[in-house]
Amino acid sequence: MVIKIGHRGAMGYAPENTLLSFKKALELRVDAVELDVYVCKTGELVVIHDDKVDRTTDGQGYVIEKSLEELKKLNAGQGEQIPLLTEVLDLVNRKAKVNIELKGPGTASSVFELIEEYVKKKNWEYSDFLVSSFNHYELKKFNELNSNIKIGAIITGIPIGFAEFAQKVNADSVNLCIEFISKEFVEDAHKKGLNVFVWTVNDRDDIEKMKQLGVDGIFSNFPDRL
């Protein structure tokens, strides 16, 4: 059974990382939604992929240099706003797991604090979350704050030693780009007790190929194709 993960919600159908996109992903019955977070100038965790707002909104400039009030005035597509992480979690409401990708600097401690709040006050479980990042130092920091939450080490390319690097940060999964996936890598990861999640797989033939390789989860902009 391959885990079905909606990439930035269901961004093939709605503006990425918006409440509309996550709502669509839930309608398509995903097992998990994936999203990206930065800490903005006023300290809130906001859900956006890029370090700048230019590509996904009608604004310009760096996310970390803008207040929440400034970010909320931007159009993130179809009249949608850049959501707070809390807004996405409240929308999901445990109907799916949430993969939080740490993007900006210092996100590990902020995400840790927010997850603690949702577990202790809102009846969420640690198992409802997966925290991932390309920044393996930030991942290691997060794991030191709470080793009960599964983490995913994201990479492009195949490192020497295959999946060995992921063991150094106590990762549960290796989240690998589709361009580099191979049977050898999947088998090595599985031997090391690691899951393999692949991004971003949209073509039906590619989806079938990933399943044949034995991957454990697939990120897709069109999660209904999974």
Image (cartoon, rainbow, N blue to C red):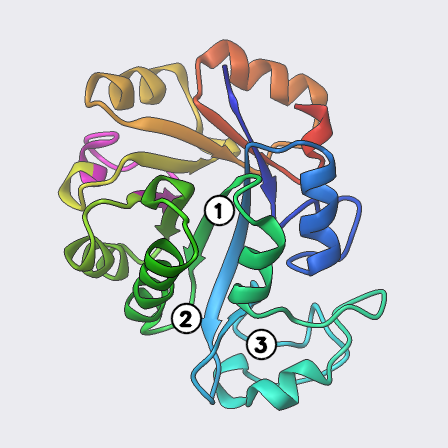
Point out the stretch of residues depicted in magenta: 151-166
Question: What residue would you read off at disc 1?
Answer: 98
Q: Tell me the crowding category of disc 3: few under 14, some 14 to 19, or many 20 or more residues within 10 angstroms, Cα based.
A: some
Question: What residue would you read off at disc 2?
Answer: 104
Badge 3 or badge 1: first in the primary sequence: 3
Select label 3 or label 1 by which is in front: 1
Residue at x 20%, y 55% (from the top left corner): 140
Q: Tell me the crowding category of disc 2: few under 14, some 14 to 19, or many 20 or more residues within 10 angstroms, Cα based.
A: many
Whether 205 is drawn above or below 5: the answer is above
Residue at x 22%, y 23% (from the top left corner): 193
Residue 158 appears in the figure: no
Q: Secondary structure at mark 2?
A: loop
Q: Secondary structure at mark 3?
A: loop
Q: Specify the label residue 225 is tagged with.
A: none
Question: What residue would you read off at disc 3?
Answer: 52
Select label 1 or label 2 by which is in front: 1
Q: Quadrant of the C terminus?
A: top right
